[in-house]
Image: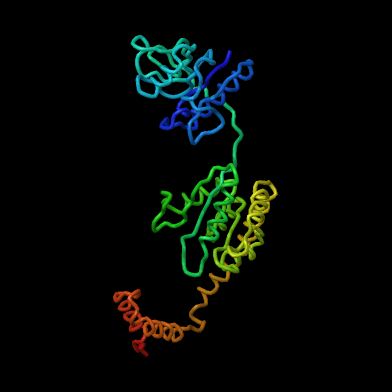
Amino acid sequence: MRVLIAGWFSFPDGHATAGDLLARDLACEWLKSAGYEFDIAVAPPFQGGINLFEANPEIYSHALFVCGPFEKKALEAQFLGRFANSYVIGLDLTMITPLDEWNPFDSLFERDSSAAAHPDIVFLSRSAPVPVVGVCLVEPYEGAITDVANAAINRLIASREISVVQIDTRLDENTTGLRSPAEIESLIARMDVVITTRLHGLVLALKNGVPAIAIDPEAGGAKIKRQAETIGWKQVFTADAVSDEALQKAFNYSLKEEARARARECSKRAAKLVEEIRGEFITTLSNSNTLSRKAEYRTDFVSAFLSKESSNSNVRKNLKDQILQAMSFWRREKPS
């Protein structure tokens, strides 16, 4: 006795889902535990089986179609026609046509049909969870080698079985559909690890006790490297010096509870330092009338900027007008 296991994963245009594969693997477990030999029919991109249309129907006593909708269409006809002389079983199927009109199975254990409904068998499936990893990348900008950093991150991702969640922290336009700081931070807080080339990808991860692997996209490092060093987080690299080996080591560390504890420690240290800044900030506001101002310094800078950029099309005329208008206000003679 030998069983051929087929499903929507057996067809190039089958649109197989995670549920299809989980149901298939559960069926395999059942057959294996009962001592039955079996083959799995798969089509690319799936591997680990045989081609449905190269399988010899004569060697299979049973043909099993597992999971999904099943109706009177071309792919179903190909399966049924090829294994017409086998004992054909339907498992975890949604039968579209009423059974009193059409039921091609010798035995049917439907998920739902015109006659009955049962729980999807995936409720009994077991799969080991994989890390959920947030990836938060900065867009290319002058002075950064983001392509090098992104390539290193992509190699790390490709080497691991992980669930990747793309997270965009920009809010003027957001490529991942996030609409507010709260939505962004809530998503980051639920990650197991965050891999980032953004400063606030690092900050929001550590703030919520999530280990971060940060790559400063500027050669030699800039604000991201400086921030990590300031708060005591060691998993920071620069794009020009990062290695695949170092990233693998950092990822392994990030999955440990030790890393989460360290992230929480960094967050507490940073929050304490920010509280000190808060106090200094409020004091400055209170005493601002007695402090010297750099008005002339600022206006000299703006004048030099406008002179330098006068022929630069990147500086729009309306922007120049706004700057000049603001400067004219401060140049007015103050009343005595």
Q: Position of residue 9 (x, y in %)?
A: 47, 29
Q: How is the image coloured?
A: rainbow
- How many numbered dots are placed on residues in this image? 0
The reply, left or right, for residue 53 in relation to residue 29 is left
317 shown above or below 10: below
Q: Considering depth in this image, is 162 or 295 the residue closer to the camera?
A: 162
Q: Position of residue 259 (x, y in %)?
A: 67, 51
Q: Position of residue 141 (x, y in %)?
A: 46, 66
Quadrant where the C terminus is found in the figure: bottom left
Image point 30% across, 78% down: which residue? 321
Quadrant where the N terminus is found in the figure: top right
Q: Considering depth in this image, is 110 or 307 the residue closer to the camera?
A: 110
Among the 4 quarters of the image, the one containing residue 277:
bottom right
Residue 320 visible in the displayed image? yes
183 shown above or below 240: above
65 shown above or below 173: above
Q: Position of residue 281 (x, y in %)?
A: 54, 70
Residue 274 visible in the displayed image? no
328 shown above or below 3: below
The reply, left or right, for residue 85 in relation to residue 271 is left
Q: Considering depth in this image, is 129 or 261 the residue closer to the camera?
A: 129
Image point 59% across, 50% down: which residue? 156
Image point 54% across, 52% down: which residue? 154
Q: Residue furthest right?
A: 258
